[in-house]
Amino acid sequence: MTSIFGFNHDTFLLITISVLIFGLVLYLFLSKSIFEPLFKSDENLQKTVKETLHELNIPISTINLNTQMLEKKIDDEKALKRLSRIKKASSELLKLYENMEYQIKKEIDKIDITEFSLKELINNSLEKFADVKKDIKIKVELEKDILLKSDINGFEKTIDNLLSNALKHNIEKDGIVEISFFDNKLIFFNTGKEIDTKNLFIIFDKYFQENTHKEGFGLGLAMVKEFCDKNLITIKIEPSKNGNKFILDLKNIIVKTKI
């Protein structure tokens, strides 16, 4: 073979491969020494965030517990009203904490996809809102239990937010919330003001609130939409004169129907 500057084709190829291998080894060595402190720093940050979230839950729980104890001992009407405002603020703070906890864990932890009972999840959610539903009647129509496969924590937050929304935007007297399952669809209906059709395209936007006099920050429905989009769940709204329906098509996450 023809020699160029003392190198033939085979020699040139051998040297080129050797240089590439040496360069790759050097790159891996330098990468480890450069990025290892960054990875360690990221692990420490994740650990700090998890510990802080855990510690935040303690004062919130303490406030709720002491508020409930004070309610039993106080008879003064004005003091009870102030206590009620503290209780509501604490409840909103707890919801924000739970949402923040889920969002952070979703970013730094692996989301586990598990099988779970729809009926059991709804019952758990109903227990959470037992003290705040007041005189609103909640009807659940689930003739059969449904086994779903998805992110159970995210789905639970979705149910909580939809139920919270149905209670918050209900009528003041003789309010009704109906939760039903039909044709692979989970339906939340609540009596109340009909959602303006012009708002149907923006109701899932962050911080949107159709009624600015209601409590909250307008984050719940945005989180619902984000979860549904990521988990192949179609969600739509059907407004009517006597209330509104939020309909979730669960066909893509249904495992089976239990009798």
Image: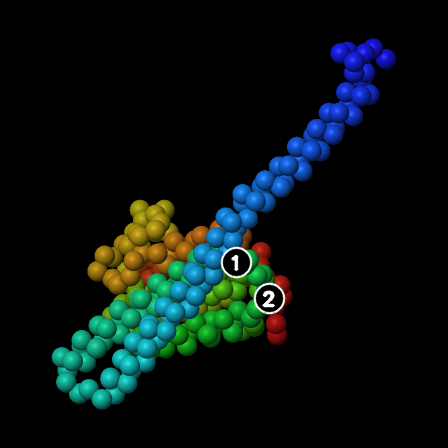
Instruction: Check disc 2 and report its element: helix, strand or loop.
Output: strand
Between 13 and 71, the one lying in front of the other is 13
* Sequence-first tag of 2 and 1: 1
Residue beneath the point at 15% across and 82% down: 77
Q: Residues within 10 Å of mark 1 (few under 14, many from 20)?
A: few
> To which quarter of the image does residue 64 belong?
bottom left
Residue 60: numbered disc: none
Residue 33: x %, y % from top left: 57, 44
Residue at numbered disc 1 = 109
In the displayed structure, would residue 253 be above or below residue 70? Answer: above
* Nearest to viewer (mark 2 / mark 1): 1
Judge left or right: residue 126 versus residue 66.
right
Judge left or right: residue 206 versus residue 79.
right
Judge left or right: residue 88 versus residue 58.
left
Q: Which residue lies furthest to the front in this view?
A: 6
Question: Is the residue under label 1 in contact with that under label 2 (CB below 8 Å)?
Answer: no
Residue beneath the point at 28% across and 85% down: 69
Whether residue 238 is visible to the viewer of this picture, yes or no, is no
Between 227 and 83, the one lying in front of the other is 83
In the displayed structure, would residue 244 be above or below residue 21? Answer: below
Instruction: Check disc 1 and report its element: helix, strand or loop.
Output: loop
Residue beneath the point at 47% across and 66% down: 156
Q: Which amino acid does label 1 sit on?
A: Asp
In the displayed structure, would residue 137 be above or below residue 159? Answer: below
In the displayed structure, would residue 207 be above or below residue 128? Answer: above
Residue 27: x %, y % from top left: 62, 37
> To which quarter of the image does residue 221 belong?
bottom left
The C terminus: image quadrant? bottom right
Residue at numbered disc 2 = 115
Residue 225: x %, y % from top left: 43, 53
Q: Which amino acid does label 2 sit on?
A: Glu
